[in-house]
Amino acid sequence: MTVSPLSPTQLHTFETALGVRRIELTEQTQRLADTFAGVQSARTDGSADGAHDAEASSLRTEWSRMSGFQAEAVQELAAIDRALLRIADGTYGLCVRGGERIPDGRLEIKPAADLCIACAEKAAARR
């Protein structure tokens, strides 16, 4: 088993930060779900049923915007869960592709990062 290059104190700090962010995102996704329900109710109450109705267009725009936020939150939650698993199995702070150490500065900015800078740049270039 590979051992994380981070000290126990650093691991605790990152685990705490990831846990706090996870709570924030969970609360955010719940608020979005509640808002989705409100928008869905407005769409189905009959007041915004016309294809050219300005309110229907506004509701579609809001729905699309919220869907994007929801998808981003779900992706970030999954990344956080994977990072917490890496902390638990001792591989946090190591690139999942090449095994190199992920710089502390990168982890401070993006605690759920699973790629070193070089691998992240390669992955971005492929998109």
Image: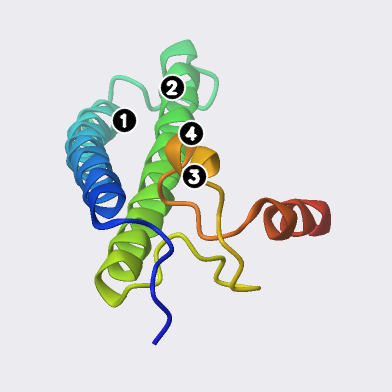
Q: Which residue is mark 4?
A: 64
The kind of residue tagged 1 is Arg
Q: Furthest-bottom residue in view? A: 1
The numbered mark, 4 or 3, whose residue comes first in the sequence reads 4
The numbered mark, 3 or 1, whose residue comes first in the sequence reads 1
Whether the residues at callouts 1 and 2 have beta carbons within 8 Å, the answer is yes
Residue 108 % position (x, y): 44, 37
Of 11 and 73, nearer the camera is 11
The disc at residue 43 is 1
- Relative to 102, is 104 above or below? above
Residue at 20% in and 28% down: 38
- Relative to 52, is 39 above or below? below
Q: In which quadrant of the rendered view does residue 40 lie?
A: top left
Q: Which residue is mark 2?
A: 56
Q: Which residue is mark 3?
A: 104
Residue 53 % position (x, y): 48, 16
Distance from disc 2 to disc 4, alpha carbons, whole Å, reads 12 Å
Residue at 30% in and 76% down: 89
